Image: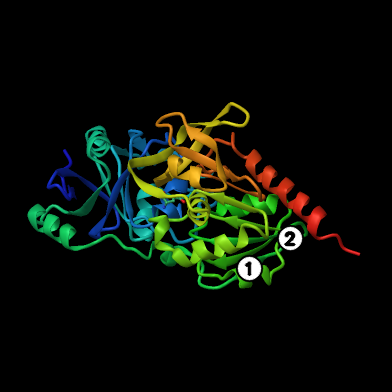
Amino acid sequence: MYKFNRQLVLADGTVFKGYAFGANTQVMGEVVFNTGITGYQETLSDPSYNGQIITFTYPLIGNYGINRDDYETITPSIKGMVVRELCQQPSNFRSDKTLDQILSELNIPGIAGIDTRALTRKIRSFGTIKGVIANLDQDPAELVAQMQNTPLAEDQIAQVSTKSAYPVAGRGFRVVLIDLGMKSGILRELTARGCDVVVMPFSVSAEEVLRQNPDGIMLTNGPGDPTSVPQTIETIKALIPLVPIFGICMGHQLISLAAGAKTYKLKFGHRGANHPVKNLLTNKVSITSQNHGYAVDIDSLSNTDLELTHISLNDHTCEGVRHKKYLTFSVQYHPEAAPGPHDANYLFDQFMQNMAEFVTKNKQHN
Ligand SMILES: NC(=O)CC[C@H](N)C(=O)O
């Protein structure tokens, strides 16, 4: 029989004992749960999870291994991983290492053998909560005191955004992508449509963006509280009347704030690949990939030039908006669909159409 050798201690003093995998290091983070049945590689490498400890509700994780292609960033920055059962013998033709191996290499600890149903029910009832993954010899009371004295990081976007601008050349529309913690899938969807992308840091000014002579602006996903980047909100405010904008997740929240709406923190957020969203313009429902802890306040949209276009069918929160006058729209979920499903991929085509309309109207060359 294996012996317990690691613990997950929550800020309210609850202790879950389990088995160590991944790196042998102690971490603190916000404990959240993800309801995807597959997609653990995309999830562990999604920069929007920066600083978080992810619990998977699906009971077996690691069964198709880790492959070369499915990373969403080169340097994953989750704090830790909590699973019910870890698979150490993956079976898939693309697999080249185990989940245990990659987490060791990335210096990220995991804990297995946890009653993830009990943990998830707790988060659902009381909300997301701080937690520590530590070896069993650490005193839980001391860990709780440490958590109380350590606030969660406030500069999360700065931690994961690119430090300087770089081009990803193409022959199509010129897109300035403001990197708030970009998932590679967003770049993949733009380059698949031929876009000539310039990736810029979150702190970029409107003048620096406009100097690239963009046909459109892409605002990506990103970690933490959307109100923590006031200068990015100012940049977006200045750009909305000038260039078509497409926002995803954090990008959606920042467009809404720039237009005068409000955001708030959800009790336990939406994380998974199975969230139903209704498009109010077409009455169609998409099954979507999601990862967010904040949301746009629907009531606050009434004081803005934005209109509600999508809602969550689980809790009726805001899932998308568009501008009444300008070619700006955004969604709270992930149409780049990594790990899938692909229902909402059409939104990238909508962005291409908006850029075509803008170029035809405003950029007729002699
Ligand atoms: N994936 C994202 O962009 C998430 C946005 C924001 N960090 C939230 O939790 O709501």
Instruction: Indicate the amino acid at tag 1.
Output: Val
What secondary structure is marked by label 1? helix
Q: Position of residue 110 (x, y in %)?
A: 29, 50
Q: How many marks?
A: 2
For residue 2, which quarter of the picture? top left
Q: Position of residue 132 (x, y in %)?
A: 21, 54
Image quadrant where one finds the C terminus: bottom right
**Scheme of colours in the image:** rainbow
In the image, farthest residue toward the right: 366
What secondary structure is marked by label 2? loop
| Vertical side of 360 occupied by 153: above or below | below
Q: Position of residue 260 (x, y in %)?
A: 49, 53
| Vertical side of 259 occupied by 64: above or below | above
Image quadrant where one finds the N terminus: top left
Tell me what residue is drawn at x 43 percent, y 67 percent.
158
Left-right relation of 265 to 229: left
Q: Nearer the viewer, residue 208 or 263?
A: 263
Q: Position of residue 146 (x, y in %)?
A: 15, 61
Residue 89 visible in this rendered orientation of the protein = no
Q: Which residue is mark 1?
A: 209
Left-right relation of 264 to 351: left
Residue 72 visible in this rendered orientation of the protein = yes
In the image, farthest residue toward the front: 303
Tell me what residue is drawn at x 50 percent, y 57 percent.
73
Numbered mark located on residue 316 in the image: none
Q: Which residue is mark 2?
A: 170
